Amino acid sequence: MPQALAWFSWDSEVVLYDERTGNIHYFDEATSTIFERIAQAPCSFGDLVSFAADQLQVVADSEMAAMVDEILMILRDKQIVAPVA
Amino acid sequence: MATSPALPSPARTGGRFGKYLGIGPFVFFVSTDIPPLAAMIETLYDGFPIADASAAHFADFHVGVNRVPGLRSIVRRQAVFDIDGVRPFFPLATGQALMMLEGGLNWTIAENTSFCLVIHAGVVERDGQAIVLPAPSGGGKSTLTAGLVHRGWRLLSDELALLSLEDGMLSALARPIALKNESIDVIRRAAPNSWMTPPMPHIEGGNVIYLKPPADSVARVNERAAPAFVVAPRYQRDVPGALAEPKSKPDAFKELAEGTYRFSLYGRRGFETLAGLVDRSQCYDVVFSDLDAAIEACDRITRSPRHR
Amino acid sequence: MAARDHQAEQLLRAVLAAPDKLGKLSERDWDLLLRQARASALVGRLAHVIEQYGLVDVVPATVWRHLAGEQRFAQRLAHDVRQEVERVAEPLRQAGVGVVLLKGAAYVMDDLPPAQGRNFSDIDILVPRADVAVAERFLKIAGWRSKELDRWDERFYRAWMHEVPPLIHRVRESVVDLHHTIVPQTARIRLDARLLLEAARPAALDPTIKVLAPADMVLHAATHLFNEGEFDRGLRDLADLDLLLRHFGQTPGFWSMLLRRADQLDLRQPAWYLLRYTARFLGTPVPAETLRQAMRFAPAMPSVMDRLFAAALTPPHPSCRGMQAHLALMMLYSRAHHLRLPLHLLIPHLLRKSFKRGAGVTQVDQPGVPNLNR
């Protein structure tokens, strides 16, 4: 997790400040859930899907996986997360 | 209804009025060569002066509203706001000089303060808890602020919330409150004993008056307050009385961030300070058509047991 | 108004030349110093100087909070500039155009002292003349657009000046000024921009981006200050030169290189003013030998120029610019135009400018209405 990030989490919604760009991001519930899980510790894709499905109280199916994938893509694009090994 | 009492003759130095005013965390040196404006400053800012022009005091800012020099009679009746030799605004008619000064003071604080956050919001306080009232102009913020102030809340500001980067406390300015159009009558009824300037035409149309701040608020101007509530007011004609809705903190944060002058320049510290304010406050939207109902809504919000 | 001695009011200049004076200021002095610094855009710089000299304790808290606050803003702005430089460099890399940064952006990317406490605005870059069109095209693809100018100004800029009209980014509103030389094409100075480009070197913070060689950087800043007739930032620019000379002056051979380059680039007069006035007003330690050798660069009427620049290199503040200063400024302004344009172009241009100037009061915002655009 880059040192340049500062965030607050309120009722499963994250507001994130990126010092590198000065941008403020407002994450929806799904993105917030995933972000906060990764912020705790690196996580495999599969575990992430299960975790998110559990938190959001939905089935961990392929649709869910696709959503998680899309969210990760956005977070990677903003250089907030990066793949590890 | 209070009428303007005979205004005292202003302190003069060679035809110019000049005084050091202690306005909350700031010292302003204010000067003018327009006698009616000088008289109004004496009355509205009674309790603020800390020194005469002859004292070589430190001032954070030197401002003035002066006649535009010129021979043509139409030009002579104009005045312009001046901050240390710079004139950021177009001149207006001399009759609007007070508006130029108040607007100029707001601008000066908003655009030249870097040691705390400056948020476009009202602030009132009671029992050690402050309400921050963010809202765009014309939304009822000043009316509600004035209403609360006359129901026992202390006035910190009707326009600018000053939030410390060090400890998240709010500083007071206790300056006159600007009221426009319908709000004027509403507040006249709500606070018949308060002192108001005569109405003057506002640049955006309609009229504006300035309400003298309560003496108690002025006396306590150096007392900072801890934020506990964020209430975003909005006047809406068709709403019955007042409706208070809890507001999500991300939404409250966003609204405050958008109302903070030069927010991006404060960097991470600014973000953490503002988010800290939202974090420790209960956040609401209050939509109202009736001022009393809105005040009651604020009462209920602030007196109910705390929930997270 | 009778000739008034403004020396007593040159407080900011005196403090920058001798920071130890800060320990002896009265309340009134602090008031005046802050106001002069604000007018000069030197608040952040002053904060930096105070910290460097370990004098924070002598500054009253009510003053220091303004200085420290502006310094923090300046740090954020420097960060933003670094980001923006990278965003500008990328499309130009794609265009195959070499980027040489000028002015403030160069100070940041090369980690030079004038970057400290600075109020940044535009990003100035120098490109070879032949590459201007393609550079502009790639920048526009990346989101920049030309600032709106009327036809006359646009023609003037392109044909006769040394920059294309400023490019503003659609979304971020950052401004890029593309230059293909550092003096106007019509100027009396014969400067070959290729010499500057050839001597350009990698910037400290990003070696893929270039900045001017030290002597060239100093001479560019000096030419801008002494030949362009604008003195709102005059003292700030002089303070930058003082810092650059102190910094580069530590490198052996710099001072003789400076004089050699001044000869090569036909920038002799700016070099003379630079050495003379930094030493005189800000106490810059210019070696006596360098000053002596620079004497051959002196203008025809040095004592006249001394008086004009003494008045112009001051804070644009009522406390230190009286009637005399305004006359001096007017003369330097005409001189700048004279240097820039031959007579047959000068008169139509000045006439057009004065016609457009109008009431002379620029509106920034309406009273009571916040400007939330930052």
Image: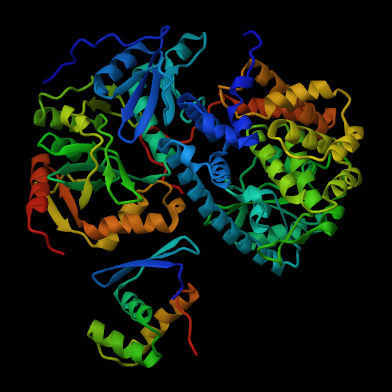
| Residue at figure coordinates x 17%, y 49% from the top left | B287
Is residue C184 in view? yes
The picture quadrant where one finds residue C158 is top right
> x, y percentage for residue B36?
32, 13
The mark total stands at: 0
B50 lies above or below B10: below
Left of B303 or right of it: where is A54?
right
Point out the image quarter for the N terminus of chain C.
top right
C48 lies above or below C17: below
Q: Nearer the viewer, residue B95 or C214?
A: C214
User: What colouring style does the render use?
Assistant: rainbow
> x, y percentage for residue B254?
33, 57
Q: Nearer the viewer, residue C134 or C322?
A: C322
Is residue B182 in view? no
A46 lies above or below C211: below
Left of B307 or right of it: where is C43?
right
> x, y percentage for residue C196?
83, 53
Left of C67 or right of it: where is C19?
right
| Residue at figure coordinates x 15%, y 16% from the top left | B3
| Residue at figure coordinates x 46%, y 63% from the top left | A19
B140 lies above or below B279: above
The picture quadrant where one finds residue C151 is top right
> x, y percentage for residue C14?
63, 30
